[in-house]
Amino acid sequence: MGLLTIPTSDWSDAMFVNSTVKLDFGTIRKLERAQIIALEQTAEYLHTEVVQAQVVPFDNGVEEWKPFDQKGWTRRLMTAKSVTISVSGKRNVGDAGNDYIAGLAFKNGRDSEADFQWTFPDGTKIKFKDAVINLKDFISGDSTGVAPLSFDVMSNGKPEVVPAG
């Protein structure tokens, strides 16, 4: 880093200015508060996205009927259940799992089924035998982007629940 040297002869043409800077601390405080609110809203949005991403809805079949002996109250019976786990990401050629899912792109029937295990943080495992892999996005997008890979893992019959421990 060098020093800037100005010959004294150049100072003869210099103009000296006296200035005062006034800071509006009220406006600065408002901007700081707005910044904090924006950060809080961003954090809340991200938290909501993470929570929603961790929700896997059950598709339940419930039959309803209104027998006379219930005096107008509805009776219900859970008659069916299924689970759909939606996964979305990017295509990563060379990754074994990614390549396996992508390899199902043009398969139908039993050829589009695979065993799938869902492990919870507490160690509980849900094992889906012959789950249907429903590939949704594959090799598409703009020419400069990484191709998407998204799919649904759909239960195909009753899964096995293995408790933690």
Image: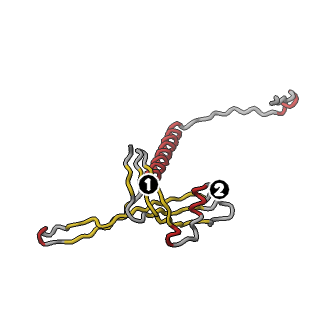
Q: Position of residue 119 (x, y in %)?
A: 44, 50
Q: Amino acid at mark 2?
A: Gly
User: In this picture, is 91 found above or below 46?
Assistant: below
Q: Amino acid at mark 1?
A: Gln
Question: Which residue is at a point 59% across and 58% down the rendered structure image?
Answer: 98
Q: Nearer the viewer, residue 24 or 99?
A: 99
Q: What secondary structure is found at the residue carrying circle 2?
A: loop
Quadrant where the C terminus sits is: top left
Q: Residues within 10 Å of mark 2 (few under 14, many from 20)?
A: few
Q: What secondary structure is found at the residue carrying circle 1?
A: helix
Q: Position of residue 155 (x, y in %)?
A: 42, 63
**Disc 1 to disc 2, C-alpha distance:** 29 Å
Which is closer to the viewer, label 1 or label 2?
Answer: 2
Q: Position of residue 25 (x, y in %)?
A: 52, 36
Question: Which residue is at a point 20% across and 67% down the rendered structure image?
Answer: 75
Q: Identify residue for label 1.
A: 52
Q: Residue furthest top?
A: 8
Q: Which label was assigned to residue 94?
A: 2
Kindly indicate the quadrant of the structure image that contains residue 97: bottom right
Q: Residues within 10 Å of mark 1 (few under 14, many from 20)?
A: few
Question: Which residue is at a point 49% across and 48% down the rendered structure image?
Answer: 42
User: Is the C-beta separation of discs 1 and 2 under 8 Å?
Assistant: no
Quadrant where the N terminus sits is: top right
Q: Nearer the viewer, residue 142 or 7?
A: 142
Q: Nearer the viewer, residue 142 or 126?
A: 126
In screen coordinates, is 78 left or right of 26?
Answer: left
User: In this picture, is 81 found above or below 46?
Assistant: below
Kindly indicate the quadrant of the structure image that contains residue 57: bottom left
Task: Answer with mark 1 or mark 2, whichever residue precedes in sequence.
Answer: 1
Question: Which residue is at a point 60% across and 55% down the rendered structure image?
Answer: 96
